[in-house]
Every structure is written in C-alpha cells, then in structure tokens.
Amino acid sequence: MSVREIVPFRRETPSKSEKGNDYGKHKPDLEEDFNYCCGYCGAFDGFGYTKTYFEIDHFVPKDFLIKSNSSIGFCKYSNLVYSCRFCNNNKNKHWPSESEDFFILDDKGYIDPCDPEYDNNLYRTEDGAIMWNTELGKWMATTAFKFDQRLEEIKLLWKYNKTRINIEKIIDELNDYLEGTDEYEEIKKELTPLFEKHYFLQRELATFYNG
C-alpha cells in the first residue's frame, strides 16, 4: 500500500509571497497541502512528542541553491516540503544529481513527494514499515531518509495514525444520527476499543521517545 494516506498536492498560488528568504511564512499552507503529514514518511503532525517536530524542507537543498547561484528562491513554494525533523535532518544536503533541473543520477536521488511516482518506488507493508521496490526507492529509504533505522518508530506512528483516522471516521458517521437513537448508540460502541487502542499506542509512543 502507499507510504502516505493521501498524496500531497501543493496549491498553485500560496497565500504568502514567494519573494524574500522567510520561507517559514509558508508553513500554514504546507501543513494543509501535505495533510498535516510528513511528505516523505507520512508521519502525522499531531502526536505532540518532543522528537516529532515538523519543519520545512527544501526539496532542492538550500546549500545547493546557494552554491549553484540558483534562480530558485528560498521561498519558491513548489520547492518546499512539509517534513518531520527526522526526514529533514537525514535528507540534509544530499543531492546526488548536482543539478536543479533533474533530481536523479544513477538510481540515486529523490522524487518530489507530491509526485504520485513517489509511491511507485516505495511502499508500506501491512504492519506499517516502509520498504522499496526499485533501486532508487532503496537509496531513498536506506541512504537518504534511513527508514530502515527508524523501523519500529515508523510502524508505531503508522498504527497510531490509522487508529486516529478510524476514530474520526466513526465520529463523522455519528453526526448523521441523533444522539440517543439506536443507530447512534450502535455506532458509538465501535469507538470504545479504538479509544483503548489509541490510549495504549500513545503510551507506547511516549515510552519510545522518552526512553
């Protein structure tokens, strides 16, 4: 299955100017366009743990833009990615192609996370791990983003997010019925085991991050 629940889609016209160097002003737009998830690993921005801060990644790295005297500005919205700190830090300055016009060289490089092709190189297993089915996917997973080194964390974050989504779907369904009706009460029963699962996964995440 796909690495991300929904493939992100950048708006054509951001609400803030693309001029200048303050790319942080685009964060609200990016949060929405990337569905509040990391564009690379799909982690949801909402767990509230110290190590899951979300940042703005420059798809073509800032250091390369400076070094190459690129025409791509720091605030060019099409070059920005909503990213968890882990993926942003691991990707860092790696840019094998050494070009702003193409992103891949000899099966090393990146696919823009807004490109559906991203999920044709990487996939998620039934237990939430991120694996690869191409040499480029392997390079991104193991060399660039180090998904293999974050295996247990990624699986846990995925399970937590799936539980959150299921809870939200049931709550939305409840809104179609009057409180106290048989239909309402029957659907409401489905929430109890999900809330329990949510609670224990949250505890596991807290233990995982705080050691």
Image (cartoon, rainbow, N blue to C red):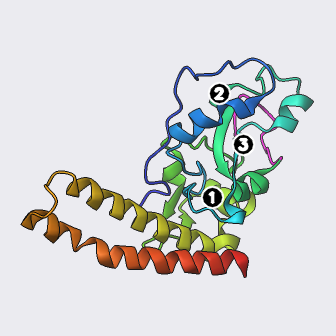
- Depth check: give the residue in front, 194 or 3: 194
Q: Which residues are magenta?
A: 93-104
Mark 3: secondary structure: strand
Q: Position of residue 75 (x, y in %)?
A: 73, 26
137 is higher (above) or lower (below) than 152: above
Q: Quadrant of residue 102?
A: top right
**Looking at this rendering, what residue extends furthest in the left direction?**
182
Q: Looking at the picture, tell me which residue is in the foreground, 120 or 31.
A: 31
Q: Which residue is mark 1?
A: 135
Residue at left 57%, top 41%?
Answer: 31
Quick check: can you spot residue 146?
A: no
Say whether disc 2 or disc 1 marks the residue closer to the N-terminus: 2
Q: What amino acid is labelled 1 in the image?
A: Glu
Quarter holding residue 44 = bottom right
What residue would you read off at disc 3? 57
- Percent across and percent down for residue 169 are 30, 57
